[in-house]
Image (cartoon, rainbow, N blue to C red):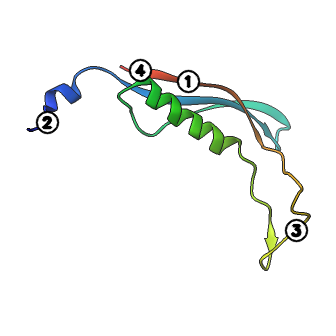
Amino acid sequence: MAKDIRRKTRGSWWYGWVRYTYYDIWTKAEREGKRSTDWDFATKGEAHREAEKLAGALASPDPQPSFRGRRMGPKTKKRPSRLTIIEVGASRVE
């Protein structure tokens, strides 16, 4: 059985997006940004799950610097995240 290409291209698609704030060290001000997923998805649930993955990746802290394979500072020290996630959502592509 072959796929019906017309059925796949018909209708609208969904994409996920993330709104966040970050602290700009040069201007010493908080700024707001928005990132969206690279792909379009067939369902709202898929787009929202992918947006949550993107939010998790954005909110993760920077890795600890190391010098010749050794970590600088104790292993238990947690670095703060540079971003604060405001909202995660999914929207239709028109």
SS type, badge 4: strand
Q: How far is disc 1 from disc 3 in space, using C-alphas?
A: 37 Å
Write down the quadrant of residue 10 in the picture: top left
The residue under label 1 is which amino acid type?
A: Gly
Find residue 31 and report its horizontal and vertical position in percent.
74, 31
Disc 2 residue type? Answer: Lys
Residue at the front extreme?
1
Q: In which quadrant will I find the N terminus?
A: top left
Q: In this view of the protein, which residue sits in the foreground, 89 or 83? A: 89
Residue 2, given in percent of the width and then of the height, sits at 9, 38
What's the mark number on residue 92?
4
Which numbered dot is residue 3?
Answer: 2
Q: Mark 1: few, some, or many residues within 10 Å (few <14, many ≥20)?
A: some
Residue 49 left/right relative to 12: right
Helix, strand or loop for disc 3: loop
Which residue in the protein does label 3 denote? 72
Cα distance between the residues tagged 4 and 3: 45 Å
Mark 2 element type? loop
Which mark is first along the chain, 3 or 4? 3
Q: Residue furthest bottom?
A: 68
Rendered location of residue 18, percent (x, y): 60, 30
Q: Which residue is mark 1?
A: 89
Q: Quadrant of the C terminus?
A: top left
Q: Does residue 36 appear anywhere in the picture?
A: no
Q: What residue is drawn where x is 87% and y is 68%?
A: 72
Marks 4/1: CA–CA distance = 11 Å
